[in-house]
Image (cartoon, rainbow, N blue to C red):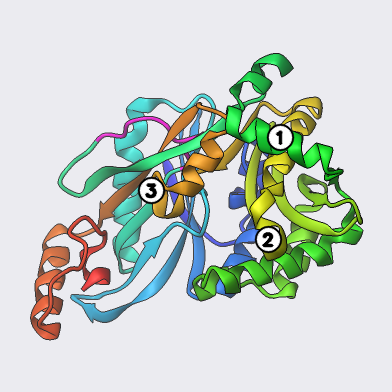
Amino acid sequence: MYSKIIEFDDPLWISFLKEYNHEFYQVPEYLKLEQEISGGKILAFYFKRENSSALMPFLIKNLEYPINGYEFDSKSPYGYSGILFSKDFNIDYYKDFFSELITLSKDLRILTHFIRLNPIYNNQKFPLSKVIDQQMHGPTVFVDLKKSIKELDSDISSNHRRNINKLIKSNYRTIVNDWSQYEDFKNIYSESMIRLNAKDYYRFESEYFEKLRSILGENMVLASVVDSDNNVVSAAIFSNYNSVVQYHLGATSSDHLDVAPSKLLFKDVIYYFKEMGAEILHLGGGLATSEDSLFKFKKGFSKSLLEFCSLNLITDYNVYKSYNKSLMKLKNSKPEDPDFFPVYRNI
């Protein structure tokens, strides 16, 4: 058995990705970009026992107040980086995987790990204990592109179909990978984040989008909807790795919200990615994994659902409990959300 905490340039990271299916969430160059935005430091836990191997990227940040030698905690980078397991990973080794992670985390003075699991690659149940808990947060929507065109079409809700037909009659159309429209997408996205009063994290600068395109290369797809005057009114970017497509970011112009051009966009990209040979298009869930209007919009294209889960891992249970109590006393406050993990980040 072998385990190690590795950095971006470690050959183990690159060789693992070359050998096993992955998405852009685990690509070092993308994670470097995420590190620039989020701060902290991104590392990965590498594990190997016999023919079973695994890789888990994570982002460490400083604790507000160090305690008993612990200085950091960890969470998954934005998105669904989860845990990549080799195809032939022996499930009997899950306990060894987490035991080694805890041991090495103690060495690095990391108190907790909040691990966002990938709904596609991590849809299994993990062994639980006093220091490992698996939480279900809500459903996400995916389109099974192995279905026939007829089946895919029938999965689209009647409401969506009515809107789509109106858009087509009004000469709206979808264009894929016309990168001269990338600037239009960036402008519409920026406008949308202001309109929605989005958190600062999501207000990406133009430089982010340029770096993202450079990193993903041919694995990145831009889809745009134009009106009868060829103005871009809605656009979205997707990643396509190993037959799995992830919807990453999208936006619609304020002037066209009433006609919902994104419905035409998603209908057309479903057929586009099917033709390209992809097997799954993951649309994601609602805001904060709730079954809100965004979730219902996505479910209008497919009723196929996955469960988005996380793992809460505590390196030192007694220190964790003591830290929570100390902060509550220090701040004279209790957690706003009783289910939030780690508790001390919610006080």
Mark 2, residue position: 29
Magenta span dominant secondary structure: loop
Residue 158 in the image: state x and y as whole percent.
59, 27
Cα gap from disc 3 to disc 1, whole angstroms: 23 Å
Regarding residue 35, the answer to whether it shows in the image is no
Secondary element type, mark 2: helix
Residue 280 in the image: state x and y as whole percent.
63, 30
Mark 1 belongs to which amino acid? Lys
Q: Give the range drawn in magenta.
A: 118-127
In the rendered structure, which disc, 2 or 3, sits on the residue that comes first in sequence? 2
Residue 79 in the image: state x and y as whole percent.
52, 53
Q: Nearer the viewer, residue 194 or 176?
A: 194
Mark 3, residue position: 290
Q: Which of 148 and 306 is in front in this view?
A: 148
Q: Residue at x 40, y 60 (%)?
A: 75
Whether residue 119 is in magenta: the answer is: yes
Mark 2 belongs to which amino acid? Glu
Cα gap from disc 1 to disc 2, whole angstroms: 31 Å
Tell me the quarter of the image containing the C terminus. bottom left
- Say whether marks 3 and 1 touch (CB < 8 Å): no
Residue 257 in the image: state x and y as whole percent.
65, 56
